[in-house]
């Protein structure tokens, strides 16, 4: 029997540079947890710069990674934390089990 998917409650936001060269914002609303999410706007490191300035406003811990598929260097963000600076780069995020 499969375990039902859980979701972190809240929003995880980040910024990225769009195809037009302008900074844009994106939000993952109530993301699955536990789960790794590769951010679609920045998944291809040959075609895009990493996302930046993540803001974990969910009720679970989030670990951001510099590479897709939750690989590379990582940094942990607390639940309902303050927005990180533009210097924190990411391409994927892992939401912990609630």
Image (cartoon, rainbow, N blue to C red):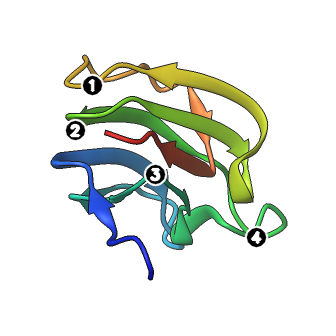
Q: Are marks 2 and 4 in contact (CB under 8 Å)?
A: no
Q: Which numbered disc, 4 or 3, marks the residue that appears first in the sequence?
A: 3
* Foreground disc of the pair 1, 4: 1
Instruction: Describe the element under mark 1 as helix, strand or loop.
Output: loop
Q: Are marks 1 and 3 in contact (CB under 8 Å)?
A: no
Around disc 4, counting alpha carbons within 10 Å, would you say few (fewer than 14), some (14 to 19), or many (20 or more)?
few
> Foreground mark, 4 or 3?
3
Per the image, the residue denoted by label 4 is 47
Mark whose residue sits in front, 1 or 3: 3
Between 70 and 19, the residue placed more toward the observer is 70
Earlier along the polypeptide chain: callout 2 or callout 4? 4
Q: Alpha-carbon neighbours of circle 1 within 10 Å: few (<14), some, or many (≥20)?
A: some
Establish if 82 lies above or below 39.
Answer: above
Give the camera-side residue of 76 and 85. Answer: 76
Disc tally is 4
What is the secondary structure assignment of the residue under circle 4?
A: loop
Q: Position of residue 31 (x, y in %)?
A: 31, 59
> Can you say whether 9 is above or below 52 in the image?
below
| Residue on which the image places disc 1 | 79
- Circle 3 sits in a helix, a strand or a loop, which is it? loop
What residue is shown with label 3? 34
**Distance Cα–Cα, label 4 vs label 3:** 28 Å
For residue 40, side relative to residue 57 (left or right): right
Residue at 64% over, 48% down: 50
Find the distance from the CA under tag 1 to the CA under tag 3: 14 Å
Q: Which residue is mark 2?
A: 58
């Amino acid at each position: 029997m499969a375990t039902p998917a859980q979701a972190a409650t809240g929003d995880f936001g980040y910024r990225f540079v769009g195809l037009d060269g302008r900074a844009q914002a994106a939000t993952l609303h109530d993301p699955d947890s536990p789960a790794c999410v590769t951010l679609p706007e920045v998944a291809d490191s040959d075609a895009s710069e990493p996302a930046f300035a993540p803001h974990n406003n969910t009720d679970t811990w989030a670990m951001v990674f510099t590479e897709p598929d939750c690989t590379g260097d990582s940094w942990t963000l607390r639940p309902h934390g303050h927005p990180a600076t533009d210097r924190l780069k990411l391409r994927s995020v892992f939401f912990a089990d609630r």
